Image (spheres, rainbow, N blue to C red):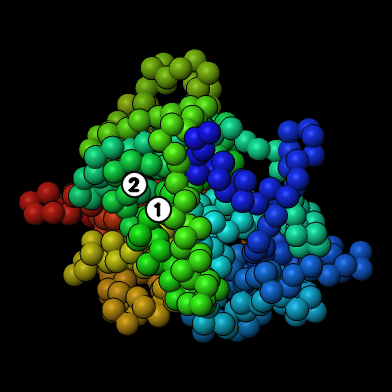
Amino acid sequence: MAKTLFDKLWTMHEVAPDGDGASLIAIDRVMLHERTGGVALRGLAETGRRPRAPSRVFAVMDHIVSFREGRGPNDARLPGGEVFITETRRMAQEAGVHLIDTDDPRQGIVHVTAPEQGIAHPGVSLICPDSHTCSLGALGAFAVGVGSSEAEHAMATGVMRIKKPAQMRIRVNGRLRPGVAAKDLALHIISAYGAGGAERRVVEYAGSAIDALSIEQRLTLCNLAVEFAAFTALIAPDENVLKYVEGRPFAPSARNLDEAKAIWSDLYTDDEAIFEEEIVLNADKIEPMISWGTSPEQCIAVDEAIPVINALPATKRDQAAKAMAYMDVSPGARLSACSVDGVFIGSCTNGRLSDLREAASVLRGRKVASGVRAVCVPGSQGVRCQAESEGLDQIFRAAGFEWGEPGCAMCFYAGGETFPPGARVVSTTNRNFEGRQGPGVRTHLASPATVAASAVVGKIVGADTLSGDKMAAP
């Protein structure tokens, strides 16, 4: 019988069905971060239990840590946040799990560190109490975001009860045009089919356009699958993935690599396999995208007009009107009329090296517009070090950006430093609901190139605005 990639991953990890449509699934690795990981570790300790396999558990400091240069080991970006850091550090040390601390050269956002270190690789099952764990399906991993209690259970038992979800394939044919990124593709899909479009299915991305994406772009695409209401996302591992994984610290060792690759070579969807739903897109139809509302679903091409409310489906109109009021935008208007107060480049969506290179290519030789606060925070220490070795930090600094220490930073507001109320911010992050980046902050989601261009012009524009005689004045 023909199988999908997810069918094969499920079979590899299924311990036993429970007779009610769910199964116990073996969990190979558990990732934790200090915002929720300490909770899971403490819950385990309070019941007198320890991780069944401490060597398969990784605690990373990323969500609450300060992004200010020269931060200390307990410096947090919100008042009282040092408790998250010190508690997770203490619990991880007592449990004997891997601790990637604030001063560790491997430190970074959990979904950036996991691929860099080989913690995530093809065929591995991995959970983390963070919804964007689906990013790691870009490597062909069975990666699922869970709650702290589920992480606690998996650490104690090595398994997790999961009801097998339905499956969807999104095939993208052709090739993305120059200037169009995986972020634009993801926002296009969500805007076209709705923020609930995946309906908790496993989404497999396939097609020639997906094959042409770099590994980092694939991670971006899979990262945003949760904003499409996916259970998780997958891309079949190819030779590029195998080369990417080889030699990383927690990937299979050289001694076991041939055996691992033999297993990985079967991680693809069979020709006759059936999905509950399939979507087919032409890559050359995708344009640079930006959100106008308070959901990734509320997106348009950068040079397109905001929708007229009466032209929307009746079920979407009230939500659109509410979003327009919060965002202070008008139906039928263009976002290029909106002045920008701040920009942020970073996060598990677009904080990787290729993202910084993309933004730097726009910023080189240019300055951020007057009155715009611009912040760039690399996704990991590895990204930061490589970016600095290439001089990218100097391009950002010369343009007027703040250059930060790795972490989630201004992706989400948890108290403490943020943009001022009412600020209009263009951001490479993944969520834009009311208050996501701070009380009253209005967040527009876009690719690194669009964010950089908007910072320079001081209004919401695409990167092509800065080419040749199209240069717009701030």
Q: Is residue 70 visible?
A: yes
Real-space CA distance between mark 2 and mark 1, rounded to the nearest whole angstrom: 7 Å
Amino acid carrying mark 1 in the image: Arg
Image quarter of residue 65: bottom right
The residue lying at 23 percent from left, 50 percent from top is: 179
Which quadrant is the C terminus positioned in? Answer: bottom left
Of callouts 2 and 1, which one flags the residue occurring earlier in the amino acid sequence?
A: 2
Instruction: Work out whether 462 lies above or below 356.
Output: above
The residue lying at 32 percent from left, 32 percent from top is: 281
Image quarter of residue 34: bottom right
- Image coordinates of residue 332 in percent, x first then y, are 32, 26
Q: Is mark 2 in CB contact (under 8 Å) with mark 1?
A: yes
Q: In the visual, does 421 lie left or right of 40?
A: left
- Image coordinates of residue 26 in percent, x first then y, are 70, 55
Q: Nearer the viewer, residue 160 or 3?
A: 3
Q: Secondary structure at mark 1?
A: helix
Q: Which residue is mark 1?
A: 218
Q: Nearer the viewer, residue 373 or 113?
A: 113
- Image coordinates of residue 256 in percent, x first then y, are 52, 72
Q: Which residue is mark 2?
A: 210
- Image coordinates of residue 24 in percent, x first then y, are 75, 47
